Structures are given as C-alpha cells and as structure tokens.
C-alpha cells in the first residue's frame, strides 16, 4: 500500500468532538488566563548580588582630554598614540589594529 507522506497525520484524539456551543464556552471560562504578569522584587537587576563586589563604593573616574599626540580610532573608538595611526580618510583616523 502506498503512503502519501504529504498528507497530514491526524490522530483520533486530535479530532474535534461535536460539542455544543455552551459546553465549549463553559470550558473556556473555566480555563481563563489572566493578562497580568506575576513579578517578584528579586527578579529585578537590583536583586542580584555579584560575588566579591562592593556595591557601596562609588567609582570616581577622572576624564583626561585627548592629547596632541593621540587620536581616536573611528573603528574601535579607542584613544591611541599617533604611532599606531594606520590611515586617515576624510578626517577620520584608523588604528593599525583595526586596519591590520
């Protein structure tokens, strides 16, 4: 006997049973899902503690402006020394690592 593999396989338990409209509506109302999402305070990012991290300290970073012998690579956006300049195109400078 030839088998048509393109034909959908339907099991008898997947076949819809001829139920009344009232029975279907009663079944739906019994299994109604709420549209609210249950969240917990510990689910937020503030609830995670990193091991070994001291969270009470505030980091103080002093920003040093770019010096005359430095440039900012337009590919990696790192400040590099002028000896690492590979090429300059339309005023944009690229480092040797990015051009490598």
Image (cartoon, rainbow, N blue to C red):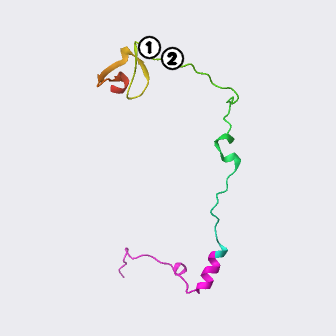
- Residue 48 spot, x, y in % from top left: 67, 40
Are there few (<14), some (14-19), or many (20+) residues within 10 Å of tag 1? few
Residue 72's image quarter? Answer: top left
Residue 30 appears at what percent x and percent y? 67, 75
- 32 up-or-down from 15: above or below: above
The residue most toward the left is 89
Q: Residue at x 69, y 42 (%)?
A: 47
**Up/down of 28 relative to 99, above or below:** below
Q: What's the residue at 69%, 50% (across, down)?
A: 40
- Label disc, if present, on residue 80 of the rendered structure: none
Q: Is residue 25 left or right of residue 95?
A: right
The residue labelled by disc 1 is 67
Residue, x 34% and y 18% (percent of image)?
85
> Residue 44 at x, y = what percent?
65, 45
Does residue 4 belong to the magenta stretch?
Answer: yes
The residue beneath circle 2 is 64
Q: Quadrant of the N terminus?
A: bottom left
Magenta region includes residue 14? yes
Q: Position of residue 73 (x, y in %)?
A: 39, 24
Is 74 or 53 nearer to us in this picture?
74
Q: Is residue 100 visible?
A: no
Q: Main secondary structure of the magenta part?
A: loop
Dot 2: within a 10 Å radius of its alpha carbon, few (fewer than 14), some, or many (20 or more) residues?
few
Q: Is residue 1 left or right of residue 57?
A: left
Q: Is residue 93 left or right of residue 77?
A: left
In the image, residue 1 sits, relative to residue 59, either above or below, namely below
Q: Which residues make up the magenta segment? A: 1-28
Q: Check if mark 2's residue and mark 1's residue have beta carbons within 8 Å.
A: yes
């Amino acid at each position: 006997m030839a088998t048509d593999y393109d034909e959908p396989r339907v099991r008898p338990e997947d076949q819809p049973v001829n139920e009344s409209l009232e029975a279907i509506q009663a079944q739906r109302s019994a299994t109604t899902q709420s549209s609210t999402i249950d969240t917990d305070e510990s689910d937020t990012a503030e609830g995670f503690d990193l091991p070994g991290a001291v969270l009470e300290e505030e980091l103080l970073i002093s920003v040093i402006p770019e010096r005359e012998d430095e440039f900012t690579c337009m590919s990696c956006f790192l400040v590099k020394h002028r000896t690492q300049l590979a090429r300059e195109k339309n005023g944009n400078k690229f480092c040797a690592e990015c051009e490598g």
